[in-house]
Amino acid sequence: MSDKAQTVWNKLAELPKPTLAELFANDPDRLLKLASRLDLGEEGIRFDWSKTHLDDAHLEKFLELAEATGFRARRDALFAGAVVNPTEGRAAEHTAQRGVGKEESVEQALGYHSRMAAMVEAIHRGAMGDVKHLIHVGIGGSALGPALAVDALARDGAMVDVHVVSNIDGAALEAAFKTCDPATTMLAVASKTFTTIETMTNAESALDWLRENGVDDPYGRVVALTASPERAIEWGVDETRILPFAESVGGRYSLWSSIGFPVALALGWPDFAEMLEGAAIVDRHFRDADPAENLPLRAAFADQFYARLRGCQTRAVFAYDERLALMPDYLQQLEMESNGKSVTMEGKPVDGPTAPITWGGVGTDAQHAVFQLLHQGTHIVPVDFIASIAPGHELDLAHHRILLSNCFAQGAALMAGKSSDDPARAYPGDRPSTTILLDEVSPVSFGALIAFHEHRTFANAVLMEINPFDQFGVELGKEIAKQIDKGGASFDPSTEALLELAGIG
Ligand code: F6P
């Protein structure tokens, strides 16, 4: 950590530590100061940090930390398309996909998007054959975003039935085969690098399935979504069926590029464009808002408070909305692959915790499974509750009233606690939570919600002085798996025994 940042952290550690009840009692304006609405045109999102331990004194010092860690310069560099990922010598231009960033990159993204829009529209028109199903094979950032977006936004009826298949376990692909008709199935091969073993193996098996089921030209059913078009061509995809995107778009930030093809196909281009616009609103806010008013930065202040000042090793996210059930999965990659690092931008060891472990689930289910630990366990877990004022169904409104009542009750209970003469029945309280309340789950608010989390992740990285855009930690396991697959290499006795038992190697 830089000396400047260390000085601020020392001051932060010395601040008084009032409880949440004291914070509310001492400041009648607390809610006003710590709850904000992000306007998205006709809708919006409310962020309420009042049930966290952030107060004026902490906010002031965290703003100093942002200054000490060069927040403004790193943010400017991000939007300027500068090299913000020095270990790989790359920019990180996901915002350009939404129209906010370096001019040439925005123009390139617009060009790629119009190619994608044309293909989506041609498919919807029937100009590319009868397409009723799409099997989208991809993994990590090439699957999690599309799976989440389709699940969140296409529940009322997708224009094309989308199956996102990621796992190399053949059972995943087989499940898709069972519900798709090969005569009307298109295959999207989504891989930034076009080398990922899971995706390429799944793609080969999907081609075999098409072939075995009477499709004479299975490559004619393929669309490649990639930043490596030359590899896609080499693999057999016709150039006209490649939807490229820029190398400077990171895998876990790629939903906005052609990796979002299944989303556009399921929803229609206008909705996909609205999702981009929702994200762009957050980009402009993050780029232009003063640090004191900057919502993703404020979220990062709360994250850093709990990770570094309170030693919380995890952060939980509970979506009180079935449509957002995949949010924790998505955020796990975004946050843990970005910020699960041990060295600073300077390549020196970090001297504190980096990304907390992100976990979570869907409310109210999680209440009946893991909330016991949140209320009475020995771990303090900062919780994010995400909910929508408008329901995502047409059943009796009682469902939604009970859902939201439970969501808000959990935050209140975590904070208030309850005393009892019987220690087993006492709740310590003073447990933090943040509530993120959408007016509705729409393409605009969904895009905004995801972009908010991207920038929150980046802001956390800035405050920790780390690079969120590389992911070398995933490589070693891949290399060893390759050695095993190739055969001839020897490993530790435990691994050797496992290989022998499974008849591998
Ligand atoms: O192994 C990690 C990773 O590189 C992720 O960062 C990425 O999202 C995923 O694999 C898939 O990579 P690709 O899109 O190149 O297939």
Image (tube, rainbow, N blue to C red):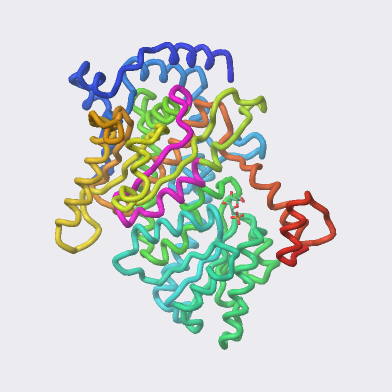
Residue 347 x, y percent position in the rendering: 67, 28
Left or right, 6 with respect to 233, comes to left
- Placement of the N terminus among the 4 image quadrants: top right
Q: Give the residue drawn at x 50%, y 62%.
A: 115
Left or right, 281 with respect to 411, comes to right
| Residue 464 vs residue 383, the one in the foreground | 383
Stretch in magenta: 308-335
Mark yes or no: residue 367 visible. yes
Mark yes or no: residue 419 visible. no
| Residue 190 vs residue 491, the one in the foreground | 491
Which residue is at the far front? Answer: 422
- Placement of the C terminus among the 4 image quadrants: bottom right
Examine the image and state in which quarter residue 300 appears: top left
Residue 496 x, y percent position in the rendering: 77, 56
Examine the image and state in which quarter residue 485 appears: bottom right
In the rendered view, would you say 377 is above or below 43? above
In the rendered view, would you say 224 is above or below 411? below
In the rendered view, would you say 176 is above or below 367? below
Q: Give the residue drawn at x 47%, y 53%.
A: 255
Q: Give the residue drawn at x 60%, y 85%.
A: 212
| Residue 419 vs residue 269, the one in the foreground | 419
How many numbered circles does the render carry? 0
Examine the image and state in which quarter residue 3 appears: top right
Confirm whether the magenta stretch covers residue 435: no
Residue 336 x, y percent position in the rendering: 53, 41
Q: Give the residue drawn at x 50%, y 54%.
A: 257
